[in-house]
């Protein structure tokens, strides 16, 4: 069994499961937002009212974490398959990981900041 310190799960099966679960979360989030935009008169008040609800902030946080995990696994897989040299692969993965970390922290700040 080959282990890598940069993959998300402990095995390929766990990575596959994270990919599938995160895809479902993102699909549900997208469908909900699409339905909200299509069937609601979206104004600043309705939009801020939606984001003022704790359940929607939690749902948005779940979507944010899902997109981070989904993107990391996808980028890890692509870089592992196509960037064969260890140093450039590490640098690309580190840049992707840092970028995703910044986006997640920024998203949490937007969702839960005052």
Image: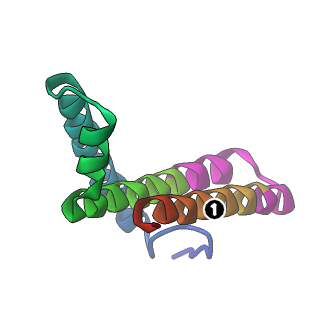
Residue 96 in the image: above or below residue 38: below
**Which coloring applies here?**
rainbow
Q: Secondary structure at mark 1?
A: helix
- Residue at screen point 22% across, 59% down: 53
- Residue at screen point 35% across, 54% down: 63
Q: Which residues are magenta?
A: 74-91
Residue 75 in the figure: left or right of residue 39: right
Residue 97 at x, y = what percent?
Answer: 65, 62
Residue 60 at x, y = what percent?
Answer: 33, 55
Confirm whether the magenta stretch covers residue 80: yes
Callout 1: few (<14), some (14-19), or many (20+) C-alpha neighbours within 10 Å? few
Residue 36 at x, y = what percent?
Answer: 20, 33
* Quarter of the figure that contains the C terminus: bottom left
Residue 9 at x, y = what percent?
Answer: 45, 71
Residue 95 in the image: above or below residue 24: below
- Residue at screen point 24% across, 56% down: 56
In the image as oriented, which residue stretches furthest toward the front? Answer: 45
The quarter holding residue 52 reads bottom left
Residue at mark 1: 102
Q: How many marks?
A: 1
Prevailing SS of the magenta stretch: helix
Confirm whether the magenta stretch covers residue 8: no
Pick the residue in front: 19 or 81.
Answer: 19
- Residue at screen point 45% across, 76% down: 10
Pick the residue in front: 59 or 7.
Answer: 59
The quarter holding residue 12 reads bottom left
């Amino acid at each position: 069994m080959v282990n890598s310190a940069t993959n998300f799960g402990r095995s390929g099966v766990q990575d596959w499961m994270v990919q599938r679960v995160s895809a479902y979360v993102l699909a549900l989030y997208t469908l909900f937002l699409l339905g909200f935009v299509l069937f609601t008169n979206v104004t600043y008040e309705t939009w801020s009212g939606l984001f003022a609800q704790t359940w929607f902030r939690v749902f948005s946080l779940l979507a944010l974490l899902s997109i981070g995990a989904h993107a990391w696994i996808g980028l890890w897989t692509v870089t592992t398959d196509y960037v064969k040299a260890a140093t450039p692969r590490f640098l690309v993965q580190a840049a992707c990981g840092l970028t995703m970390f910044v986006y997640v922290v920024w998203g949490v700040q937007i969702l839960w900041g005052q």
